[in-house]
């Protein structure tokens, strides 16, 4: 078993999205299912108070010590005879690095600017006189390169290089929070999620994170708004329906960002969020047509909405083929696929389109247009998937993934 040693001689660090940097280390270890024999929080020679983070329940033992001397000397007292992951409580580390680095059989250092972490079998490999972890790495330890790191993130449909930041000031914290926020956006998504909603999401995520609001509560509000919109649209109350629908569309980005930025994502939250995204759009489309036709289920516009439902299901089934074969989404295959994802038929494209058409007095015509757009999207995905399967298979796509 290995030990995680955290140098907390300078405190628990700045709060990033409501969490101290020490707390982020502990939460990241738990989130990535890293199982050390123990986590040692070294407060240095000062008789400072035991940090509150150490008193919480964690899936691994946490011990607080107060060692004096250089980094190597303090580390050696806590890691005798064990491999050690050395961290700094002033550093924010890419969560993917914890399990990747501890799975290595060789000593390894990771550094970027002033931030560093080390995976070593013997603290003697560190500079015996250094007082800072990055200085202690010296030149003897091999460095992890970006080329060695599997940077593809399947859930975000993008490749992201690993990162480390040392945060000593509020200005540095603000800069890192911005970086983390944008790094948690999907590589391929619709136009409105990518370009229109982010300022609203940013304004909501920060105070919610600092208030320690769990993202599942945001998801529950989103669910309420989603299903409240259906009878409102169906009853012809389109203004109220639009307010619910756009509220849900923004919150759909908020809960995911909040979960990933605070390590509070859960299996239940993922099921609720992704299940809601998958199921609700056809109900909105049918409700639009029902409201416009004043409840006439035999009207051409309502029958068109049923055709939309069929096309939607077919499209979703087609999109299951690529990840089943290659372990990642179709829209990650090539740049053209990511580009097409920006404006294909999806809720966040169809909702603004219908809003404009309804306000302009062409609600019925817009629904016909949306049905045609869904048919075109379905056709594109079908042809594209068949082409890839026959002629353009990705080479070892799964080997580049990181969870």
Image (cartoon, rainbow, N blue to C red):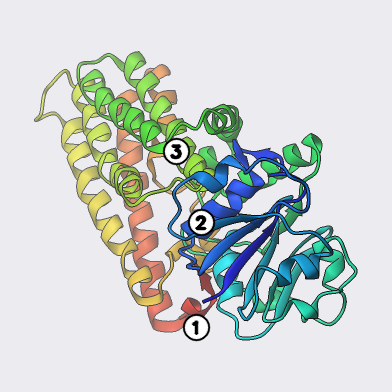
Residue 357, disc? none
Between marks 2 and 3, how big is the CA–CA gap?
14 Å
Residue at 76 percent of width and 53 percent of height: 44
Q: Residue at x 20, y 49 (%)?
A: 310
Looking at the picture, tell me which residue is in the foreground, 394 or 43: 43
- Give the structural element (helix, strand or loop) at label 2: loop
Residue 132, percent from left and from top: 84, 60
Q: Report the residue at 63% width, 49% height from top.
A: 22
Residue contact at pointers 2 and 3, CB within 8 angstroms: no
Q: CA distance from mark 3 to mark 1?
A: 32 Å
Residue shown at the point (35%, 38%) measured from the top left: 369
Q: Is residue 365 above or below residue 102?
A: above
Q: Quadrant of residue 98?
A: bottom right
Q: Which residue, given by chain and number where applicable, does mark 1 sit on?
A: 396
Q: Badge 3 local density, few (<14 within 10 Å), some, or many (20+)? A: many
* Percent coordinates x, y for residue 145 in the rendering: 73, 75
| Marker disc for residue 156 | 2
- Are there few (<14), some (14-19), or many (20+) residues within 10 Å of tag 2? some
Question: Which circle's residue, 2 or 1, is located before the other in the chain?
Answer: 2
Closest to the observer: 303 or 224? 224
Q: Earlier in the sequence, mark 2 or mark 3?
A: 2
The mark nearer the N terminus, 3 or 1, is 3
Residue 255, which numbered label?
A: 3
């Amino acid at each position: 078993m290995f030990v995680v040693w955290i140098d907390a001689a300078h405190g628990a660090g700045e709060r990033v999205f409501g969490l101290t940097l020490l707390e982020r280390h502990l939460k990241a270890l738990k989130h990535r299912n890293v199982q050390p024999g123990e986590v040692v929080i070294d407060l240095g020679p000062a008789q400072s108070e035991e940090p509150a983070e150490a008193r919480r329940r964690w899936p691994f033992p946490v011990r607080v010590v107060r060692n004096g001397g250089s980094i190597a000397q303090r580390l050696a007292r806590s890691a005798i005879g064990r491999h050690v992951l050395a961290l700094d409580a002033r550093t924010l580390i890419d969560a993917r690095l914890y399990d990747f680095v501890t799975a290595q059989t060789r000593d390894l250092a990771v550094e970027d600017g002033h931030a560093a972490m080390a995976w070593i079998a013997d603290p003697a490999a560190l500079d015996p006189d250094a007082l800072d972890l990055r200085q202690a790495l010296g030149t003897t330890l091999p460095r992890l390169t970006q080329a060695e790191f599997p940077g593809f993130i399947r859930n975000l449909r993008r490749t992201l290089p690993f990162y480390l930041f040392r945060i000593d000031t509020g200005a540095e914290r603000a800069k890192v929070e911005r970086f983390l926020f944008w790094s948690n956006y999907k590589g391929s998504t619709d136009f409105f999620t990518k370009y229109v909603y982010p300022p609203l999401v940013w304004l909501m995520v920060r105070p919610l994170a600092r208030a320690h609001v769990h993202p599942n509560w945001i998801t529950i509000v989103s669910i309420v708004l989603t299903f409240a919109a259906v009878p409102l649209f169906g009853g012809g109350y389109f203004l109220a329906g639009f307010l619910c629908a756009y509220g849900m569309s923004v919150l759909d980005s908020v809960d995911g960002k909040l979960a990933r930025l605070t390590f509070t994502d859960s299996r239940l939250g993922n099921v609720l969020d992704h299940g809601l995204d998958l199921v609700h759009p056809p109900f909105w489309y049918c409700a639009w047509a029902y409201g416009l036709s004043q409840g006439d289920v035999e009207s051409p516009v309502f029958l068109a909405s049923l055709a939309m439902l069929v096309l939607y299901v077919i499209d979703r089934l087609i999109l299951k083929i690529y990840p089943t074969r290659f372990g990642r989404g179709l829209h990650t295959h090539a740049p053209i696929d990511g580009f097409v994802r920006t404006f294909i038929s999806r809720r966040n494209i169809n909702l603004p389109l219908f809003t404009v058409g309804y306000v302009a007095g062409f609600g019925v015509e817009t629904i016909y247009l949306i049905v045609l757009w869904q048919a075109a999207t379905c056709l594109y995905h079908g042809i594209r998937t068949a082409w890839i399967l026959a002629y353009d298979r990705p080479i070892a796509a799964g080997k580049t993934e990181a969870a």
